Image: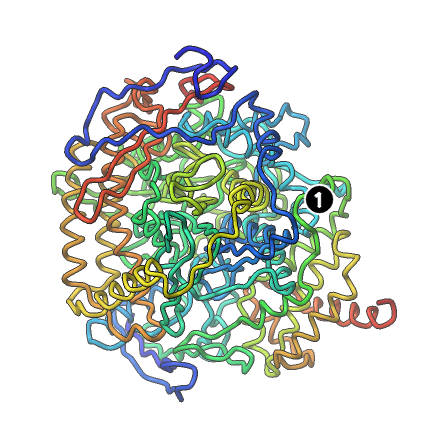
Amino acid sequence: MKLTLKIWRQANASDKGAIKTYELDGVSQDMSFLEMLDLLNEQLLHNDEEPVAFDSDCREGICGTCSLMINGEAHGPEVTTTCQLHMRSFKDGDTITIEPWRASSFPIVRDLIVDRSAFDRIIQNGGYISANTGSAPEANSVPAPRDKAMRAFNTATCIGCGACVAACPNGSASLFLGAKITHLGELPQGQPERYSRVQTMLAQHDAEGFGGCTNIGECASACPKEIPLDVISQLNKDLRNSMILG
Amino acid sequence: MAAGTHYLPGLTPTNEAPVQKSDDAAGYYVLGEKLVDPKTPTGPIADRWTTRKFENRLVNPANRRKLDVIIVGTGLAGGAAAATLGEAGYNVKSFCYQDSPRRAHSIAAQGGINASKNYKSDGDSDYRLFYDTVKGGDYRSRESNVYRLAEVSTNIIDQCVAQGVPFAREYGGLLDNRSFGGVQVSRTFYARGQTGQQLLLGAYQAMERQVAAGTVEQFTRHEMLDVIIVDDRARGIVARNMVTGEIETHLADAVVLATGGYGNVFYLSTNAMGSNVMAAWRAHRKGAYMANPCYTQIHPTCIPVTGAHQSKLTLMSESLRNDGRIWVPKNAEDCTKDPRNIPEADRDYFLERIYPAFGNLVPRDIASRAAKYMCDEGRGVGPEVEETQPDGSVKKFRRGVYLDLGAAIERLGKDKIEEKYDNLLDMYERITGENPYEVPMRIYPAVHYVMGGLWVDYELQTSVTGLFCTGEANFSDHGANRLGASALMQGLADGYFVLPNTITDYLADGPFDKIDESHPAVVEALDGVTSRVEKLMSINGERSVESIHKELGQIMWEYCGMDRREEGLKTAIGLIRELKKEFWTNVKVLGSAESLNQDLEKANRVADFIELGELMCIDALNRRESCGGHFRGESQTDEGEAMRHDDEFAYVAAWEFGGEDGAPILHKEDLIYTAIEMKQRSYK
């Protein structure tokens, strides 16, 4: 396949940045999207042009490192991570626009790389169950109902990639937040801190400059792990309850 | 050896110390002094860890905040250790090359974590988990370390459940188990095919809690480039801030490396793109011994390679072997047919045929080699790929065998299979474009995990005082082969329970004399790193780092892969030495060192992979026996099974750096067993 790539280039956080166009030939259908970029970088290097910086690590769809807006969509046209998107989703002769995540809470570091450390700071503010090492009770001493455990698991699969934020017109991280609130709130172990957790995590979310949720739902459609939109209802419900009960 | 030697007073050794007769690697190495772990515990095996914990000195809570510990790596071993030492009140500085600790490669582990809970009442116990692990590792691990691992395994599950790790559960709300390759009990706890992710998030969240509490300071997008040693003690690291390019020094009372494995030396592996050997290798060059580097685990169930563009390989959890039957066509002419049209009678379920007792659940090394041999015979499936033979000729092979869920779907229903393996099967379909519910999956072995790593004593301290090493980065627990679901167990055992107990004994001597940035040893380490980076930036040759890494990978896979032989290994050493020259005279790195520069990062790592590759080949050349993930073609039975030589090689090969142009120095640590008798492994 032969492609035209329009890629955001930005040397560092303070650089202005611009789209540059590259022609790339010899792309195979079996390549992942990132392997296509590897090929481009090899070509750029031989032409003495600095390779495009982009984030990736496991390339198995689980670490959440890769990002990329592809033709205006977070992770591109399929419901998956960029590393699991394959070139068979594109056609010979296509023009593809590649940009970094769009959100002011994720400042650009270089080219296609953004800084998502705001997510770590949200977790620091209550995104855990306080259980010191070495003092845990026998694992089976607290049974967890299977349906609740399943729901906890389904929301715990969030990879923290930030696609939800990038897809949201408000730049809200409510899906990320709701997923963690639901994961920990569905389990018996998570109950003691349930209501303080929602307040502190949400306060940090707002302090980081993420926008409010207006139930548009772009987040859930862009989520590569298909975290359901109703975790945001759970978030709101826990927040209401925290004001009454907490 | 007689009972009552200095190894384990009061207990009877079950084997003699080895005496090596062969010397295949003569000329490539220098023989050093024998190594004896000075901290090997004594007494009955089940009491050793308890006794050691009691004997270790403690640091009182008020003194802990005066002590600084650097932990490099934030996977299961590093993240868990940072969380635990932070809770205890030490000042922890945690480093990772990723943008967040949550992205460490432990997150990609799929299948599960072992623990001897015996929830299924199928005869499991600490001793049985210990026994399976030592036997599965072909009797090349230390028995005291492995027993301790089995002993703390149950605490790990308790800890993770308390943190909210959503393990699979039965309808009654209790935890579920499944079984894994190499064992006959169900002791594996799992969270669908994402167990590593869930365990890592547990450790990460526990660590972030300590960041908020102020006991852990986290440095992301930082890569360790050297260790600082002052008066023979590890006192800090040199790291590069990968965003600004600044080379920084960080000082502490002790340093812990939890930096994972080096499988990427093969270029193609299931490791994350950034997984590297630099921290361990830099420590090696500063005096830390590298043990058993040739032990590479080849995982039997990965998605086969599709072409030259491939950047990495994807593993399919071997838990699929519980329900998937592995086969190839009986007749080579059927290999291009649609597998659904090949009748039962024409299928060769080769693992069930050769190893009836374990069938599809034989350990990884055995399953991997069997698949290779089927393909070598011309009965592989999938696309044909050209391979260069050792004599230079080119032959075509199909490198794939079927993993067929058909019978399980018929027996259990599609829903049950979907519930168990959902995300794995989605991932397979996404990568291959084939639906595994309808067409048998194609799998092939790939480089996955390394059992070799920095040598550590029982306390997880390397041969450099004050430098500790945990998880996959050390050598200690898996011997020559790792059983499924025990990597996660080791990472968390080391991080939550072992290191936090052993490091206190070392820290009880601290705080050590204050040093500052102007200390000559600090300046020297900093200058060394800076000039190396300058050198890499100034070569300005023709070759991309990527192309050199690929070439190294091809050499390693061809000559130091699933079947190693004397001649091939000697060829490989020659090729690697040439490649090293090529790298340092002809590599091309653009851009600047004072900014984010991914090619520079890779160049730094590949330079170390080249040196490590040579040592792996020398280690493999010396070990003229087959054990676990190390299969020497010259050492096999008439039936083609691996043949160990305990009388010659029941030792840990700990390599000391021999200087820039010197030969590596081999220190042997004899493996003496008292709680287990060495037997030939048989899974028939």
Number of numbered markers? 1
In screen coordinates, is B247 left or right of B133? left
Q: Which residue in the rendered view is the most extreme toward the right?
A: A244
Judge from the rendering whether residue B339 lies leftward or rightward of residue B176; answer left or right.
left
Query: Given the current orientation, which residue lies at the most extreme top position?
Result: B2
Q: Position of residue B356 (x, y in %)?
A: 46, 22
Q: Quadrant of the N terminus of chain B?
A: top left
For residue B412, what is the image quadrant? top right
Quadrant that contains the C terminus of chain B:
top left
Query: For this rendering, which residue is in front, B363 or A120?
Result: A120
Q: Residue B426: where, in percent of width, then height?
A: 51, 54
- Rendered residue at 49%/44% (across/down): B317
Q: In front here: B324 or A82?
A: A82
Using the rendered view, name the quadrant where residue B445 is placed: top left
Instruction: Give the camera-side residue of B382 and B147.
Output: B147
Instruction: Please tell me whether residue B513 is drawn above or below residue B412 in the rendered image.
Output: below
Q: Residues within 10 Å of mark 1 (few under 14, many from 20)?
A: few
Chain identity of mark 1: A
Query: Can you name the residue that lies furthest to the left here?
Result: B392
Helix, strand or loop at label 1? It is loop
Q: Give the amino acid type for the residue marked by disc 1 in the picture.
A: Ser
Q: Position of residue B593 (x, y in %)?
A: 30, 72
In the rendered image, residue B529, in percent from the top left (x then y), is placed at: 30, 62
Which residue bears the numbered disc 1?
A135
Drawn side of residue B517 relative to residue B129, left or right? left
Q: Quick check: can you spot residue B494?
A: no
> Which residue is depicted at the point 76% across and 47% down?
A144
Residue B600 in sight in this render: yes
